[in-house]
Each structure stands twice: as structure tokens, then as C-alpha cells.
Amino acid sequence: MKDWIQNYSLEFFKVTNSISVEKVGTIIEILRNCLIEDRQIFVVGNGGSASNASHFATDLSKGGSDAVGKRFKCMSLNDNVSWMTALANDYDYDEIFVGQLRNLANPQDLLIALSVSGDSPNVVKAMNWAKENGLSTFALTGARRGKITEIADDCLVINSDHYGRVEDAQMMICHILCYAFMENPEMASPRSD
């Protein structure tokens, strides 16, 4: 078991070491622009990615906002269970995110999709709807990439198809995104360049 644990850790470090610092910087800049322009940020995912989406929305909305002195408008569409189950029951499970976006989203808002496979039908449908309705889109996915990377304006691909390691790396990236603002609050100021 000790060897297995050490191997898991070593493989995780390989995955995290392959993450594009430039792509993480791109997402930070996108979030910064959303904050400055008062645009809404929506985050979606299934399973472990849903938990990561919720965690990210909480950290950015609370911790990021507290640090910069301006409020991030960020929410995980995984968090309203009654709405999700109503949409799934009355329409289809594929509608659980699109149904909420129809009520809440405006052009120029941002949809961030977290997915290991990149092919979850409800996430793909949400990404398509977002593109068709003028939202910006970003995909954070595993090595299989999937359909969402073909739809998204931009993406960060985590170089693994191991669900645990991709979800671990997702959360690490989400923490970097939040702590970029929590530890560098001056980023909330518009640049004069």
C-alpha cells in the first residue's frame, strides 16, 4: 500500500507539473475582466467536478470578493438541487444547466465547465447554449478533451485521464485562480494601459 500511495502522489505531481502556467494566467485575466465589468460567472460540472465547481464558486465569491473589495458574481449551477431535479424530472437531465442559464445568463457572461471526459451531455448542451447566446466559455478538462474543448472559446487540458488525478488538479487550479485575487487584491483595479 505504501508503494501505491507514493506512486499516486508521484503521478499527481507529474500531472500538476504539466499544467500550462500561461493557460492558468489566461483564466485569471478572464476572471479579472468579469470582475471589473460586473459580468456573471457560471460554473458547472458533474460528480467530483460538481463539487469542485461549488468549492470554486464559494472561494471566489467569498474569499476573492473579500480580498479585492469588490464582489465577484460567481455561482455554481450545481448548487440548487430543487431546481436541478425539477428540470431533470420535467424535461431531461441534459437540461439541468441550460434551464438555469436561460433564466440567469446574459451575453458577455462567462461559463466555465469542469469535466474529466469533456463529453457529459448536460455540460456539452450548456456550452452550446452559452456559445449560441453570446456568453464567453472556458473548459477545464482531462486528456480526453471531449466535445466541450471543441465548443469552448478556450480550454485548459489536464494531461491525464485518471478521474481522481484530474479532479485533484482541477481543485488545485481552482485554488490558484481564487488565491490569485486573495493574495494579489490590486488585480481588481482597472489597468491604465
Image (cartoon, rainbow, N blue to C red):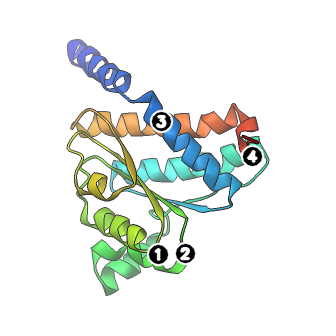
Residue 190, labelled with which disc? 4
Q: In the rendered image, which quarter is residue 158 located in?
A: top left
**Labels 2 & 1 near each other (Cβ < 8 A):** yes
The residue singled out by tag 2 in the image is 104
| SS at circle 3 | helix
Residue 154 at what x, y percent from top left? 39, 49
Amino acid at pointer 4: Pro
Instruction: Give how far apart the Cα atoms at labels 2 and 1 are.
Output: 6 Å
Instruction: Give how far apart the Cα atoms at labels 1 and 4 are.
Output: 31 Å
Residue 13 at what x, y percent from top left? 34, 20
Q: Closer to the camera, 112 or 191?
A: 191
- Residue drawn 55% across the image and 64% down it: 109
Which is nearer the N-term, disc 4 or disc 2?
2
- Farthest residue toward the bottom? 90
Q: Closer to the camera, 51 or 193?
A: 193
- Farthest residue toward the right? 69
Position of 104 with respect to 68 (left or right) is left
